[in-house]
Amino acid sequence: VKGINVSPVEVEAILAQHPAVEAAYVVGLPPDGLDQRVVALVVSRAEPFPEAELRDWAHKQLSAYKRPE
């Protein structure tokens, strides 16, 4: 992300700690660009999925450049 390496495993581990998350998979998009975005695919334990709550969780746990969009 803008020249800073982001470990998908680190972001996945943080997201997976949230009680509503069964599993999280993190990738950088676009895969061939220098200005990548962090994107997370999440398998939910809850219905409906508390997206705003998870975004708040990520905001508190991760640096701004590591937060999934």
Image: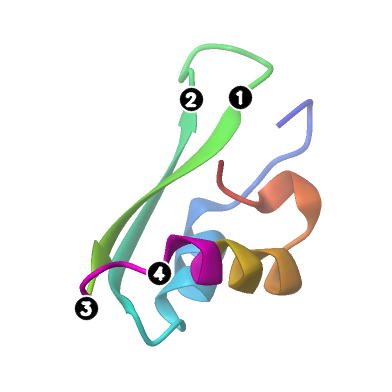
- Secondary structure found at label 1: loop
Q: Residue at x 78, y 51 (%)?
A: 64
- Secondary structure found at label 2: strand
Residue receiving disc 4: 50
Q: Which mark is residue 45?
A: 3
Q: Nearer the viewer, mark 1 or mark 3?
A: 3
Residue that protrudes farthest toward the top in the picture: 33
Q: CA distance from mark 2 to mark 4?
A: 23 Å
**Against 48, is 40 above or below?**
above
Is the residue marked by circle 4 packed among few (<14), some (14-19), or many (20+) residues within 10 Å? few
Q: Which mark is residue 29?
A: 2
Tell which circle, 2 or 1, labels the residue nearer the N-terminal end.
2
The overriding secondary structure of the stretch rendered in magenta is: loop
Q: Residue at x 61, y 24 (%)?
A: 36
Quick check: marks 2 and 4 in contact, CB under 8 Å? no
> Viewer-proximal residue, 50 or 10?
50
Q: Nearer the viewer, mark 2 or mark 4?
A: 4
Tell which circle, 3 or 2, labels the residue nearer the N-terminal end.
2
In the image, which residues are magenta?
A: 45-54
Is the residue marked by circle 1 packed among few (<14), some (14-19), or many (20+) residues within 10 Å? some
Quick check: marks 3 and 4 in contact, CB under 8 Å? no
Quick check: marks 2 and 1 in contact, CB under 8 Å? yes
For the N terminus, which image quadrant? Answer: top right
